[in-house]
């Protein structure tokens, strides 16, 4: 399985790293794509080196897409190549996940009409104006779309993402130390 994550300067560190590491735990191949092939910084100063530039991405090479929270979503929605990639994922019925302000890119792609979603409270009116059915929940799965409210809801969002992708829990136990329930 292969998942694409779109980032730009100003991504929310938690909403990138928590799902990214969880995907890696499940042995999902993850590609990080940014507008340019240079390091991008998160809102808390963490830096990520992208694997690819967005304009070279072929959505058909992936099984899913993730758009993290943060001011980066506003930067991505202004890049037509990012909006085109997202639009292709949506139009082809592929799995798409967005958390917090990440839904802004879906707004620009015209992908929310009639969808039941959650998002950062600051953009809920924009989401409603785009024809989406907003619900104040931690995470929502609606068809091929998974949405989350924000960083505080990462456990629910990440669980919904893993369920949506159909990835079984593959966490390995080493040295006989089982995780506690």
Image (spheres, rainbow, N blue to C red):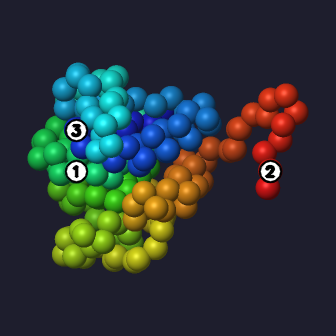
The mark tally for this picture is: 3
Direction from residue 150 to residue 10 in the image, left or right: left
Which quarter of the rendered picture does the C terminus lie within?
Answer: bottom right
Mark seen at residue 147: none
Distance between mark 3 and mark 2 Cα atoms = 37 Å
**Residue drawn at 68 percent across, 44 percent down:** 168
Give neighbour class at mark 2: few <14, some 14-19, many 20+ (Cα, 10 Å).
Answer: few
Q: Are marks 1 and 3 in contact (CB under 8 Å)?
A: no
**Residue drawn at 80 percent across, 29 percent down:** 174
For residue 128, above or below residue 73 = below
Give neighbour class at mark 3: few <14, some 14-19, many 20+ (Cα, 10 Å).
Answer: many
Q: Earlier in the sequence, mark 3 or mark 2?
A: 3
Q: Are marks 2 and 1 in contact (CB under 8 Å)?
A: no
Q: Are marks 3 and 2 in contact (CB under 8 Å)?
A: no
> Where does label 2 land, which residue?
180
Q: Is residue 7 visible?
A: no
- The one nearer the camera, 29 or 48, is 48
**Residue drawn at 24 percent across, 68 percent down:** 123
Question: Which secondary structure lies at badge 1?
Answer: loop
Q: Earlier in the sequence, mark 2 or mark 1?
A: 1
- The one nearer the camera, 143 or 21, is 21
User: In x, y percent, where is residue 127?
Assistant: 25, 70
> Where does label 3 land, which residue?
9
For residue 24, above or below residue 16 = above
Direction from residue 116 to residue 181 in the image, left or right: right
> Where does label 1 land, which residue?
71
Q: Earlier in the sequence, mark 1 or mark 3?
A: 3
For residue 93, above or below residue 40 = below
Which quarter of the rendered picture does the N terminus lie within?
Answer: top right
Residue 43 figure quarter: top left
Question: Which secondary structure lies at badge 3?
Answer: loop
Question: Which secondary structure lies at badge 2?
Answer: loop
């Amino acid at each position: 399985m292969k998942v694409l994550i779109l980032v730009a300067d100003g991504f929310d560190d938690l909403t990138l790293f928590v799902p990214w590491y969880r995907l890696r735990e499940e042995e999902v191949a993850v590609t990080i794509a940014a507008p340019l092939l240079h390091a991008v910084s998160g809102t808390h100063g963490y830096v990520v080196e992208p694997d690819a530039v967005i304009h070279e991405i072929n959505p058909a090479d992936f099984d899913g897409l993730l758009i993290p929270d943060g001011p980066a979503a506003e930067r991505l929605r202004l890049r037509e190549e990012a909006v085109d990639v997202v639009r292709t994922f949506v139009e082809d019925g592929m799995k798409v996940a967005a958390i917090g302000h990440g839904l802004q890119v879906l707004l620009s792609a015209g992908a929310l009409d009639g969808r039941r979603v959650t998002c950062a409270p600051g953009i809920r009116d924009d989401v409603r104006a785009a024809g989406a059915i907003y619900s104040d929940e931690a995470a929502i799965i609606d068809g091929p779309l998974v949405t989350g409210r924000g960083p505080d809801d990462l456990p629910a969002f990440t669980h919904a993402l893993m369920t949506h992708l159909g990835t079984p829990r593959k966490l390995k136990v080493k040295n006989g130390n089982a995780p506690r329930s």
